[in-house]
Image (cartoon, coloured by chain):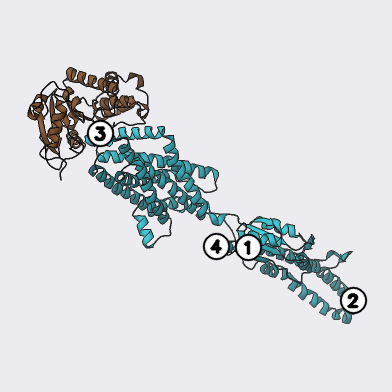
Chain colours: A brown, B cyan
């Protein structure tokens, strides 16, 4: 049984898309293929990997290198003309100045996630792919991360695709929801469409949650 | 190449910051190498033997001008083996417990028998059945020691006989049983007899002088025969002469074998473990999910890991060679060849390790797998040539590396085998490195 089947997804500049789905629905697989980290047995991705920044759920940084060294290395690998300057720019934007010379394996979870995100930005991507970016963060760290992502969208027109287990997070930070179930797209559209399709009224905090569950369990 | 250099620089920096890993990956192989060197050179160890001295006389005897006592004998034995003087019971227990390799018993009356010049004193040597190889080695050492002492005594006997011959021929002072006097000698006797004959003939006593001719003939014949005694005695004393010389490039094959084995184990383990850990740690850091997105090609990634292993091997190998050159009698030269050999061996060991690291899921598994794969192959590589073991060892870097190290250490002339050995290592580095790149490219990134 394929992990993904007939998934068709497009992303507009500056758009934010949330991937929702139960465990094993294929969210991480889809993001991995879009990021170029995994290969699809069929189909194609029409974006150069360099134009897409990848934020895996488990931070992908070198623990024995400092935050600055990680950023400098990945900026150089991404082909940035001046990796040192790029690293300093990322340190400033990610607010890592105080910990820039500390080893990554000695940073707090939230700080490592910010470093993980900063590394993904080293190639100056047009879109970011984030696999459950807030799964291990505290509420305070979540707020801080989403604030930064909001700034990136506003300042640079960065498009986002993020996977999440939280319907609330999806409805709050995404322009569009894509619900995956059993490797197929079960729903794609705005929050209003999701609620309308499920016969739920707007304004109820739990309406989207119920609509999502009905959608997933109905298949 | 730029990306390969970036990853290589990162690896070396990470290695520097992981002193525990560095220590384990370098110190452990060095310790194993020391053990291997000690095992391979065990034949050069000084075995311990127990000596049971039943000759309580404490006498010193002069045999043919050579003062001799049991203590002298034990001191001479000490040049060959470590001697522990024990009682008969304690010596027997020490042999059974393996604390000594043999028991040498000096019988009661040993010195008296030696002094008699009639009875031959006998020593008894018992070796333990626990280690027949070492037992044989000790027997050879003691036979050699007894032979050397016998030879020295024989030399003294012959020298004394020859001094007597000289006395008979040339005359001189002689001292026997506390009495001393002047011996005439055959040569001076002949002069006296011939002078006497002339004087008798002058006095008309020709008949009497003629009767002395037989005495002159006897003296001449005896002198001539005794003149042959010296070369004859020399021939008896040492029927076969061994002329020893030293060639300028002379080496110690056993030490070379031991050191080549130690070098192989040390570099083989360090290179393979380091490279396996370097690649698998990319998974531990989850960095593979980024690198695999086209940031670094599998070939460049593998190349960086193989190069870091080669640099480490060359550094460790050069340190070992330098230490051996400074601290031991083993001659180490051909430094340019050595640099090339160490780098090529490091590349091949690294490629072997990277392949293991590419297949393993994490660093711990990779290290264990690399160790389990390398140890039997290292042992195979050190077996004598030929057979299935030799063929298997030639399929991995360890066999050709061992032969190459041995050749550089012990071959008086570098022949084509060194070139072939290096080409063999380069080919294996390419094959294992290529396989590792394919494995890295095919495996899921996470």
Q: Is residue B27 above or below residue B198?
A: above
Mark 2, residue position? B200
Quarter of the image for residue B204 reads bottom right
Q: Using the numbered discs, state the Cα–Cα distance from disc 3 to disc 4 in whole angstroms.
A: 59 Å
User: Can you give x and y, in whole percent of width and height, for residue A132 in the image?
Assistant: 23, 30
Q: Are marks 4 and 1 on the same chain?
A: yes
**Residue pointed to by mark 3:** B290
The front one of B175 and B68 is B68
User: Nearer the N terminus, badge 4 or badge 1?
Assistant: 4
Q: Nearer the viewer, mark 4 or mark 2?
A: 4
Residue on which disc 4 sits: B133
Viewer-side residue, B69 vs B252: B69
Residue B45: horizontal and vertical position, in percent? 57, 54
First in sequence, mark 2 or 3: give its number: 2
Q: Residues within 10 Å of mark 4 (few under 14, many from 20)?
A: few
Q: Please say if the residues under marks 1 and 2 sit with CB atoms less than 8 Å apart.
A: no
Say whether marks 3 and 4 touch (CB < 8 Å).
no
User: Which element carries disc 4, helix, strand or loop?
Assistant: helix
Element assignment for label 2: helix
| Residue contact at pointers 4 and 2, CB within 8 angstroms | no
Classed neighbour count for the residue bearing mark 2: other residues with Cα under 10 Å, few (<14), some (14–19), many (≥20): some
Residue B256, position in %: x, y? 49, 52
């Amino acid at each position: 049984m394929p992990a993904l089947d007939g998934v068709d997804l497009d992303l507009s500049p500056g758009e934010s898309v949330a991937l929702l789905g139960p465990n094993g629905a294929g969210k991480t697989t889809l993001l991995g293929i879009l990021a170029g980290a995994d290969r699809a047995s069929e189909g194609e991705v029409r974006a150069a990997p360099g134009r897409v920044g990848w934020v895996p759920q488990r931070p992908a940084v070198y623990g024995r290198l400092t935050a600055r060294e990680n950023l400098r290395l990945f900026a150089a690998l991404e082909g940035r003309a001046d990796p040192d300057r790029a690293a300093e720019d990322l340190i400033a934007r990610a607010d890592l100045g105080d910990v820039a010379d500390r080893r990554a394996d000695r940073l707090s979870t939230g700080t490592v996630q910010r470093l993980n995100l900063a590394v993904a930005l080293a190639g100056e991507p047009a879109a970011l792919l984030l696999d459950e970016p807030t799964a291990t963060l505290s509420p305070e760290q979540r707020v801080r991360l989403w604030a930064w992502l909001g700034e990136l969208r506003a300042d640079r027109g960065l498009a986002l695709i993020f996977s999440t287990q939280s319907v609330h997070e999806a409805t709050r930070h995404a322009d569009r929801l894509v619900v995956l179930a059993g490797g197929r797209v079960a729903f794609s559209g705005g929050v209003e469409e999701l609620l309308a399709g499920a016969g739920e009224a707007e304004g109820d905090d739990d309406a989207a949650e119920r609509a999502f569950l009905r959608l997933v369990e109905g298949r | 190449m730029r990306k390969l250099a970036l990853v290589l620089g990162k690896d070396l920096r990470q290695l520097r910051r992981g002193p525990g890993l560095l220590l384990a990956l370098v110190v452990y192989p060095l310790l194993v190498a020391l053990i291997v060197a000690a095992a391979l050179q065990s034949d050069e160890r000084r075995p311990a033997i127990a000596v049971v001295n039943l000759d309580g006389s404490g006498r010193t005897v002069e045999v043919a001008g050579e003062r001799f006592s049991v203590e002298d004998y034990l001191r001479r034995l000490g040049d060959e083996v470590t001697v522990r003087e024990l009682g008969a019971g304690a010596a027997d227990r020490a042999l059974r417990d393996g604390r000594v390799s043999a028991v040498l018993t000096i019988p009661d009356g040993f010195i008296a028998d030696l002094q008699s010049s009639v009875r031959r004193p006998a020593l008894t040597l018992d070796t333990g059945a626990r280690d027949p190889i070492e037992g044989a080695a000790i027997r050879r050492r003691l036979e050699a020691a007894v032979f050397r002492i016998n030879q020295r005594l024989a030399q003294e006997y012959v020298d004394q006989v020859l001094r007597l011959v000289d006395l008979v021929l040339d005359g001189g002072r002689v001292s026997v049983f506390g009495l001393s006097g002047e011996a005439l000698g055959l040569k001076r006797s002949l002069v006296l007899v011939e002078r006497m004959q002339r004087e008798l003939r002058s006095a008309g006593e020709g008949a009497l002088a003629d009767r002395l001719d037989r005495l002159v003939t006897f003296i001449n014949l005896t002198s001539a025969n005794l003149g042959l005694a010296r070369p004859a005695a020399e021939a008896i004393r040492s029927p076969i002469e061994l002329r020893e010389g030293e060639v300028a490039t002379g080496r110690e094959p056993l030490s070379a074998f031991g050191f080549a084995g130690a070098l192989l184990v040390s570099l083989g383990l360090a290179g393979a473990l380091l490279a396996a850990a370097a690649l698998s740690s990319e998974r531990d850091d989850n960095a593979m999910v980024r690198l695999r997105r086209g940031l670094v090609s599998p070939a460049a990634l593998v190349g960086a890991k193989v190069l870091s292993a080669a640099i480490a091997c060359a550094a460790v190998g050069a340190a070992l060679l330098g230490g051996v050159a400074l601290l031991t009698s083993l001659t180490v030269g051909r430094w340019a060849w050595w640099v090339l050999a160490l780098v090529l061996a490091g590349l091949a060991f690294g490629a072997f390790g990277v392949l293991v690291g590419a297949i393993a899921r994490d660093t711990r598994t990779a290290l264990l797998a690399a160790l389990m794969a390398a140890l039997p192959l290292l042992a195979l590589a050190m077996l004598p040539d030929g057979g299935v073991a030799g063929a298997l060892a030639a399929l991995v870097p360890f066999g050709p590396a061992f032969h190459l190290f041995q050749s550089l250490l012990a071959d008086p002339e570098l022949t084509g085998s060194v070139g072939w050995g290096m080409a063999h290592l380069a080919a294996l580095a390419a094959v294992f490195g290529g396989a590792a790149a394919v494995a890295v490219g095919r495996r899921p990134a996470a």
